[in-house]
């Protein structure tokens, strides 16, 4: 990090302001900002700052990643508070909604506000430590000047500054209340960061700041926003993607009490009403005909699976190389070659809060106030500006707590916001667009179906000397982020990541992607590419081990010998589960699966009860580097394991004639409380920097269960979801 | 006009009797803690108490709810200190939080009728409510804690 200049013209910001604010600059340094009273106000009236200290000793810390349940509203501020030496009991946190000056963005996400791919803690960790440490350094210098003592003699403890030689002390709030603090000038070096042994906040299970409001119903999601004069919109969406509506009659709809207007859009017909039931009744009463020209009106998920299976086995099919190690040409046709094909079907996000948005467009049509639950404030603001043909500074954006996201609210969550904007502009009123659960299921942007073919050339001891992992699937990236899709390289990390299997030494190795045209709308799903890719690989390796008379642990230990961190989680999981010694009638299965730098091994214990698969227990040993909030991390892992188990049991979106066949939770039913295993999560501390926890529970789970079932029944499980009763 | 008794108060709601209670609570009475999840009685995010019974408010009309005592998450306790709410904080149950009003209301009704439920009774009762974040383990622990402390 570079030296940072404190702007001398801001030295008197504190006069009469009653609050200190620190902003972390894009370069990693700290700037001092004026308090709200004197600040250059941003369009939404907020002051651009990370930390605000008020005379009552309260410390408010901003956080950039959007809260969707993963706990960043607590864990990110913990990092700042640690280095600031704040009194945690006085800390509150506040969501960043806009970032016009580019100071709040996630360094791992190109500096934009974007929470996805388990990147928040990993991306912000060093950055926020420096922010907290430099803020603390500024407080020390002010106190030293106030007491006329050397800054080196001033220390901090839990929100209080001390000068032990003189016995002086004052709280951070008292600094904020100083009438004329001596502001440090000149260049500020990187502050010294605390050694890990001195941490008192990071690594502790402080109560999550977001939880009390979630037990009283007080948490506000965008679906809860109410505005004066607001109307509720229900949209009749195309039966097949891309079809265009022709309104035949809205007479019956308009006759319904409460219906305010019917608006025909390019891609939908909207009913605006004083309340949502009236909007729904109006929608039911519409008479609309649709074009029948969409290329997707013949889309069929059964056909797509057949096409994917054909493509993965067709060695003449064009394949994009994702990863290549060792010598290029390998003959995968010999007698010592073992092949396995694995399939994952489409899955839907099923976040509990149906997609929705609230927008109030300005009278001139060139600006708006928006309330949205989104994994990327930055992308949402850019899209909103594009929809209105305006500039981002005209968008007053409120990033709301999300009622679940799991990939559905990333850059892809634009349809409801777009429609709320268009309808608000057309009606001249604030509009809330709410999708029903049926809208949400039938217009899902699904994780694509994938078919994997793995080929291994085995040596005399049954170990691979060469391995190829071919994935056939449509591209998520090409569909969901077309402006960032590179048609030359055609690399789709959302599908392929994890297939590189970088902890394994397979001799010659290649991972490749056979791109097949999409038949449905697509997006990433919790676990992203790692979940399907690790499922295929870990099932395949277990089958190889069995075929060569080896056991799953020692077989993997040989292949992972070059990765001490991988071996550590493998060994820890084996030990904690007493792997291989399942009770009578049950079996254990194991899978090693990372997510980026986080490594894990999972063990499942299964049986069949009345022909029904039952996962009784699930153990996992995880090395995520430093853990900020162990309790919240465990919660993420438990949730990830249940996502994985749910994808094993029955999650499947199918479509025919371009229409998704499922409608609601009665035919797309995520896992319920009666189906969960006992879960045990153990951390393996490598001391590495933190590397995220949102996805890691997912990739290991399905293959561990599949391997346990194969052990129990002798039947390989090569298809997600499993085919059902044994 | 339908008269509703919600959280000990009486409200006149200007809506037809076939209006789902869920939407009257949310949009007319502005009690937003009761959530819309599925509209089909499949997820339980809209769970409230009707005369003490856990009920899907999306499946009950205000006409049918008239004359009953309706309790929402906002009326479970005056200040969020119901034993179930406190257990929910102690066990750090919520993640995204969206389903949790419904989970808490069902758990509170369960304990009111069966103060010492077995693990199996907890699971059977709570199977009506979905949580996509996967907080189920903590839900069980919190109910067991509330049963102990209640």
Image: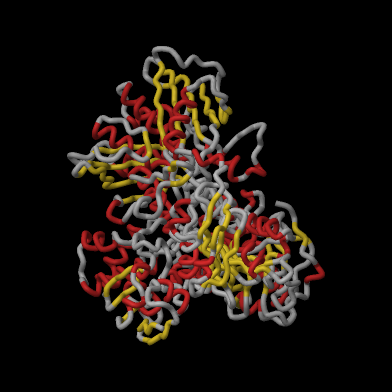
Taking the image as drawn, is residue A684 in sight?
no
- Measured from the top left, where is residue A268 in percent x and y? 57, 56
Q: Nearer the viewer, residue A606 or A84?
A: A606
Residue occupying the point 54% across, 19% down = A316
User: Residue at horizontal 38%, vertical 52%?
Assistant: A638
User: Where's the C terminus of chain A, which quadrant?
Assistant: top left
Task: Give the vertical position of A570 relative to B144 (above or below).
Answer: above
Residue A669, position as x, y percentages in the image: 36, 52
Which residue occupies the foreground of this view, A105 or A146? A105
Of all residues, the one furthest to the top in this rendering is A335
Q: Nearer the viewer, residue A219 or A185?
A: A219
Q: Is residue A110 visible?
A: yes
A170 left or right, relative to A621: right
Which corner quadrant of the image does residue A30 belong to? bottom right
Tell me: residue A191, above or below residue A183: above
Residue B12 is situated, as x and y percent measured from the top left of the image, at 41, 85
């Amino acid at each position: 990090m570079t030296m940072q200049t404190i702007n001398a013209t801001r030295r008197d910001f504190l006069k009469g302001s009653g609050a200190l604010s620190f902003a972390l600059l894009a370069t990693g340094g700290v700037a001092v900002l004026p308090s709200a009273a004197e600040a250059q106000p941003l369009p939404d009236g907020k002051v651009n700052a990370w930390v605000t200290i008020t005379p009552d000793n309260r410390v408010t810390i901003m956080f950039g990643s959007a809260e969707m349940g993963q706990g960043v509203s607590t864990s990110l501020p913990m990092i700042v508070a640690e280095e600031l030496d704040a009194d945690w009991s006085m800390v509150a946190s506040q969501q960043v909604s806009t970032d016009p000056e580019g100071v709040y963005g996630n360094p791992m996400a190109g500096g934009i506000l974007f929470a996805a791919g388990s990147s928040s803690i990993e991306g912000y960790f060093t950055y926020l430590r420096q922010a907290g440490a430099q803020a603390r350094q500024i407080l020390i210098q002010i106190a030293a000047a106030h007491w006329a003592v050397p800054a080196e003699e001033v220390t901090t403890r839990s929100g209080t500054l001390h000068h032990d030689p003189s016995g002086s002390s004052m709280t951070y709030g008292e600094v904020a209340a100083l009438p004329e603090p001596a502001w440090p000038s000149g260049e500020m070096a990187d502050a010294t960061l605390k050694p890990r042994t001195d941490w008192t906040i990071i690594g502790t299970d402080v109560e999550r700041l977001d939880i009390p409001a979630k037990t009283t119903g007080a948490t506000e999601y965008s679906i809860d926003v109410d505005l004066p004069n607001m109307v509720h919109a229900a949209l009749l969406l195309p039966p097949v993607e891309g079809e265009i509506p022709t309104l035949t009659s809205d007479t019956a709809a308009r006759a319904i009490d409460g219906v305010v207007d019917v608006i025909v859009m390019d891609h939908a017909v909207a009913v605006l009403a004083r309340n949502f039931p009236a909007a729904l009744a109006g929608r039911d009463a519409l008479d609309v005909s649709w074009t029948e020209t969409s290329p997707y009106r013949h889309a069929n998920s059964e056909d797509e699976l057949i096409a994917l299976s054909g493509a993965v086995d067709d060695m003449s099919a064009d394949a994009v190389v994702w990863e290549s190690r060792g010598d290029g040409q390998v003959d995968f046709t010999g007698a010592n070659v073992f092949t396995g094909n694995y399939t994952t079907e489409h899955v839907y996000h099923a976040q509990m809060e149906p997609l929705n948005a609230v927008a109030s467009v300005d009278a001139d049509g060139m600006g708006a106030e928006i309330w949205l639950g989104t994994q990327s404030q930055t992308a949402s603001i850019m899209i909103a500006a594009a929809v209105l043909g305006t500039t981002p500074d005209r968008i007053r954006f409120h990033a709301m707590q999300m009622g679940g996201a799991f990939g559905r609210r990333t850059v892809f969550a634009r349809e409801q916001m777009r429609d709320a904007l268009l309808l608000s502009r057309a009606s001249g009123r604030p509009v809330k667009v709410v999708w029903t659960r049926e809208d949400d299921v039938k217009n899902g942007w699904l994780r694509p179906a994938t078919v994997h073919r793995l080929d291994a050339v085995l040596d005399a001891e049954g170990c691979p000397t060469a391995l190829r992992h071919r994935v056939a699937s449509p591209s998520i990236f090409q569909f969901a982020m077309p402006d960032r899709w590179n048609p030359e390289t055609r690399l789709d990390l959302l599908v392929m990541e994890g297939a590189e299997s970088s902890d394994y030494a397979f001799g010659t190795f290649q991972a490749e992607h056979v791109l097949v045209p999409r038949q449905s709308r697509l997006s990433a799903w919790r676990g992203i590419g790692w979940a399907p890719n690790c499922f295929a690989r870990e099932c395949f390796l277990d089958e190889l081990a069995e075929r060569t008379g080896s056991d799953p642990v020692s077989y993997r230990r040989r292949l992972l010998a070059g990765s001490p961190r991988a071996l550590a989680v493998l060994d820890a999981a084996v030990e904690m589960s007493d792997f291989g010694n399942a009770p009578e009638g049950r079996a254990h299965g194991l899978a090693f699966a990372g997510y980026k730098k986080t490594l894990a091994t999972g063990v499942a214990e299964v049986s069949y009860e009345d022909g029904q698969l039952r996962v009784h227990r699930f153990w996992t040993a995880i090395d995520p580097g430093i853990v900020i909030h162990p309790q919240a991390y465990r919660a993420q892992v438990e949730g990830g394991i249940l996502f994985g188990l749910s994808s094993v049991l029955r999650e499947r979106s199918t479509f025919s004639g371009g229409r998704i066949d499922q409608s609601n939770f009665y035919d797309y039913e995520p896992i319920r409380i009666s189906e969960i295993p006992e879960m045990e999560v153990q951390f393996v501390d490598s001391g590495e920097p933190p590397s995220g926890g949102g996805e890691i529970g997912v990739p290991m789970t399905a293959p561990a269960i599949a391997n346990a079932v194969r052990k129990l029944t002798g039947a390989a499980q090569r298809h997600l979801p499993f085919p059902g009763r044994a | 006009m339908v008269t509703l008794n919600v959280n000990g108060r009486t409200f006149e709601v200007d809506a037809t009797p076939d209006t789902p209670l869920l939407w009257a609570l949310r949009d007319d009475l502005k009690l937003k803690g009761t959530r819309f999840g599925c509209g089909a009685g499949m997820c339980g995010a809209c769970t409230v108490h009707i005369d003490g019974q856990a009920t899907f408010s999306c499946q009950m009309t205000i006409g049918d709810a008239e004359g009953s005592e309706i309790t929402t998450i906002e009326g479970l306790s005056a200040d969020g200190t119901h034993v179930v709410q406190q257990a929910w904080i102690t066990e750090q149950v919520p993640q995204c939080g969206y389903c949790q009003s419904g989970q808490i209301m069902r758990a509170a009704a369960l304990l009111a009728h069966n103060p010492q439920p077995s693990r199996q009774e907890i699971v059977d009762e709570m199977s009506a409510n979905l949580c996509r974040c996967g907080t189920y383990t903590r839900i069980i622990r919190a109910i067991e804690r509330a049963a102990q402390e209640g």
